[in-house]
Amino acid sequence: MKQRARPRLADIAAMAGVSVATASRSLAQPGIVRAETLHKVRAAALQLGGPHALAEPRGRGAGIAAIVPTLDNAIFSRALQAMQATLAEAGQSLLVASSDYRPDTELAALRGLLARGIDGVVLVGAQRPPEAWDLLEEAGIPVVLTWCGDPRFDGVVVDNRAAGRLAARHLIGLGHKRLGVVCGARRHNDRQRERADGVRDALAEAGLDLPDWRVIEQEVTLAGGRTACATLLSLAEPPTAIICGIDHLAVGCLVEAQSRGMVVPDELSVVGIDNLEMAAHLSPALTTVHIPTARIGEAAARAMLARLSGVAACGVLELPIELVVRHSSAPPRG
């Protein structure tokens, strides 16, 4: 006789009338749960999946997981720090993995974390292969998306396209007409893609264009920023200003321009997005778009805790962004 598929933890919790976290504890650590609650959860599990649902529960109370593109970036480490502090206050632990901006690596990390019995997962961005969404749907655990959202899931997001528009409108307002863009690979990175699209939007509003050869994709490192800046400056008509999809790339552009003896912003304006702590302390200080990374981490943790406590819907929270004008942008010469 074919054995029934194991039920999702979320379904067991719903039938028992308890939170996902309580259902997880009941199946993984029955000794710490009240007898009445334990009876309801076990009865629901048996009804939905048969005896094997008790022997192999889906959630084992391993904690909350977060998968970020890289740990070698202050943007994500800042968000993770705030996330961990908020979860710790509620007695929850945080497991962290990185994907190196690779969908296959993220998928492998997700499989491994689900096998450990995590109670919920926080992910960066809303773009990933169907296999990843299938895994999450089957697991039935809470999911919180960050930076970019999807209406099917809880999320803490910012308007990345608006960030690109803010940066471009600032430079257009200064009189720049020939802009260059330096960003990370856009194919699997919705944040970088939307920021570059926002720059195009603002240029189109002003009757200007952004040809593909003035959009350079590079690894999100200082060296990547230097390489991209060198490419743009080698053009027959180089841009008078460069917008970077992330501050790390902008710092690389500053270094490359200055290594060539160029004066920023007199000969080249550079604008970033993120507002890393270092941005205010560069010479010149970097004009950038502020993304509230610590608030993203804290709010994502609170959304996860709310979902685990049984809140029916958290929804998508959009946090505000703002242009921070410093000294790396100025009107073009001539």
Image: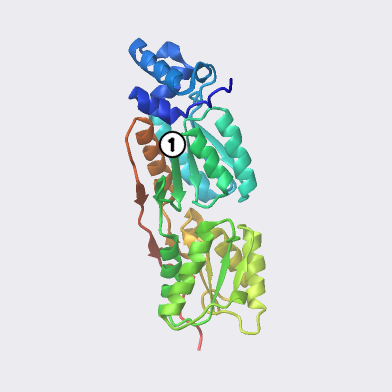
Can residue 246 be seen by looking at this rendering? no
Q: Residue at x 61, y 60 (%)?
A: 185
Of the pair 20 and 242, the residue shown nearer to us: 20
Q: Position of residue 325 (x, y in %)?
A: 41, 67
Q: Residue at x 55, y 70 (%)?
A: 181
- Depicted 98 relative to depicted 246: above or below: above
Q: Position of residue 193 (x, y in %)?
A: 53, 63
Of the pair 283 and 235, the residue shown nearer to us: 235
Q: Position of residue 280 (x, y in %)?
A: 46, 60
How many C-alpha atoms fall within 10 Å of the one at disc 1: few (<14), some, or many (≥20)?
A: many
Q: Residue at x 35, y 30 (%)?
A: 309
Of the pair 210 and 53, the residue shown nearer to us: 53
Say which element carries label 1: loop
Q: Relative to residue 85, is residue 217 drawn left or right?
A: right
Q: Residue at x 60, y 38 (%)?
A: 109
- Depicted 215 relative to depicted 124: above or below: below
Residue 160 falls in which quadrant of the image? bottom left
Q: Residue furthest front?
A: 1
Residue under label 1, please give it: 142
